[in-house]
Amino acid sequence: MSEKTRRFSSIFVLLRYKKTSEEIPSQYNFWAESWQRLRSNKMAMFGLITLFCLLFMALVGPWLTPYTYYETHLHLKNQAPSSQFWFGTDELGRDLFTRVWWGARISLLVGIVASFVDLVMGVFYGSLAASIGGKVEEFMMRVADILYSIPYLLVVILLMVVIGSGITTIIIALTITGWISMARIVRGQILQLKQLDFVKAAQTMGASPFRILARHLIPNATGSIIVTVTLTIPTAIFAEAFLSFLGLGIQAPIASWGTMANDGLPALRYYPWRLFFPAGFISLTMLSFNVLGDGLRDAFDPRMRL
Amino acid sequence: MIRFLLKKIFILFLSLFMVASLTFALMQMIPGDPFTQEKAVPEEILKAMYHHYGLDQPWYVQYYRYMKGLITFDLGPSFKYQGRTVTEIIREGFPVSMTLGFEALILSIFFGIALGSLAALKHLKWQDHITMVIAVLGISIPSFILATFLQYLISMKFDLLPVARWGSFDHSILPALSLAALPTAFIARLTRSNMVEIMQEDYIQTARSKGLNSFQIVIRHALRNALLPVVTYLGPLTTAILTGSFAVEKIFGIPGLGQWFVMSITNRDYTVIMGTTVFYSAILMLCVLLVDILYCLIDPRIQLINKKVRA
């Protein structure tokens, strides 16, 4: 698969530069054209708009109700959704609407921070390996391969057992092996780009390897990096929800969507909304990131349409 | 081919060794020990227990025993369940998980290929769009959410299938469906994108001009080539089904290895955690190796390249 992707993107990179020189010589702008393509993709725009709405609600949602996420109303437990409690209440009478948007903050925070750390580590490791080359590169990538062959969630679960639950530990656990796919993609991209004439031209003109990396190689790999980040965020959000669902994640009274789903599971038969609201938002968020990521890939790289 | 295999097997053992050492190191790093949370136990009994489980030895002796145990498939006793060994737990739970996993695997391969081919044949028509919407939903909805949804809708509301537990084939339908959703979606997308490309090839045009109908073209000519990338996906697919089983077995109360694993985590039953982790990793790496071999066997082009390299 990676072979194939590599082959494809190399074709694409060549075409892209061919296009620059022949068809639209002066006004060609990679970002503007990608944005045009993204805008015409209905699914991707749906994802983008939904994500903005979710983000907005995560920021504003908890303040729209007179309740807090930890305040209990024991005489009002397991209420169905109503005008008083928009999403109903849980077994301690806590308002689910408030808790869902608090959960959105936690889930989005974990997803975005973990992906950002992956991004930094992955770009650093991948570009370092690709620019050093030779035996060192082989060794670095072999290490990455071996780490990659250990199932991601298994590692994360083990780490959570050892370092205990909490938001920080979950982010640490997610990033300890999460950066590897980014590193592999960045390395692959840079190896291809290095073959191109403009890099050779820069070398001939005496640019330092660091300058070539920072000014030529990484900027040209930005498209695939953005796509990878967009598709890493839902993976991280899923991993957090999954861990919390297994009882390993965020601890009470703070709730992420995963913990809320876990709390709602025993009451599924009689109070299904307790599970369906958080579960629905996990799915909606992952869906939005996935369609946006697919759309971005198509937009940056129309040849690689899936 | 043989050199390639030996190299792969070597890497497999290296990775397994690393996983085993890593789990050992992680378990050593946990503050306290498995008996600390229990009520005040007399000093002597505690000492006897330490001695019984070999915890009074220095870490390198424990490491040596652990490694020796791994080679002889003796994964030690469970800390929480008196008189049970980890090997027994695996022997009991794994067949259940494997049955479920196989069902999910077959479901996802069959439906994935069927949906993907349909989408490719009706490329850019409504069938294609619907299939791809289903596929993106399948990728986005986590298996544990799908599982609860199916359980609620089909078992609780319409009472069509058993709500939980394990036993007959009926019990396995919903869990297998929820585990199969994500791999089905992935395979459908892979098959579609390959098939769309292959349908443009010259030999398909030839087949068409010979007067074959599109069904025959797909079965006899296109599918074979479109399936190659699907084979490479079998490794990640096994991972998805396996990790998915942790939550799905919990939801449906299935006595498989996944449930044992989750329970051992909540119980902090360290020997079981270590044993099952290493076991899971071994299974997954073996699957990846099998896929590599399978790939070489079914794609004659790869062998050709290998021969050339050797010559």
Image (cartoon, coloured by chain):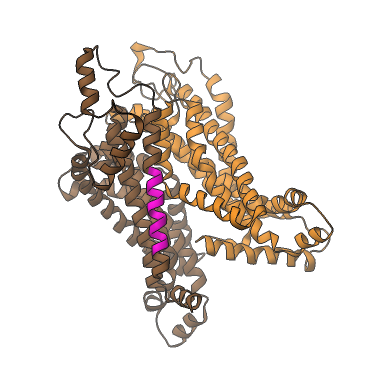
The residue under the point 61% across, 62% down is: A9
Question: Viewer-proximal residue, A177 or A27?
Answer: A177
The residue sitting at 55% across, 34% down in the picture is A54
Q: In the image shown, does B2 or A27 lie closer to the viewer?
A: B2
Picture layout, residue A229 above or below residue A302 = above
Judge left or right: residue B82 versus residue A111: left
Evaluate whether residue A273 shows in this view.
Answer: no
State the image coordinates of residue B54 (x, y, percent, origin top left): 25, 29
The correct choice, above or below, for A243 with respect to A77 in the image is: below
Query: Residue visible at 56% across and 50% down?
Result: A140
What's the colour of chain A in the image? Answer: orange
Dominant secondary-structure state across the stretch colored magenta: helix
Query: What is the tally of numbered marks visible in this picture?
Result: 0
Image x and y of residue B241, in percent: 34, 49
**Residue B266 figure quarter:** top left
Residue A266 lies, in percent from the top left, at 28, 28
* Chain coloured brown here: B
Q: Is residue B2 above or below residue B98?
A: below
Taking the view exactly as shown, the residue that stands out farthest to the bottom is B210
Membership of A21 in magenta stretch: no
**B17 in magenta:** yes
Q: Quadrant of residue A240?
A: top left
- Over which residues does the magenta segment extend? B6-19
Res B138 seen here? yes
Residue at the spot 77% in from the left edge and 62% down from the top edge: A200
Residue A302 placed where, x, y %? Answer: 62, 61
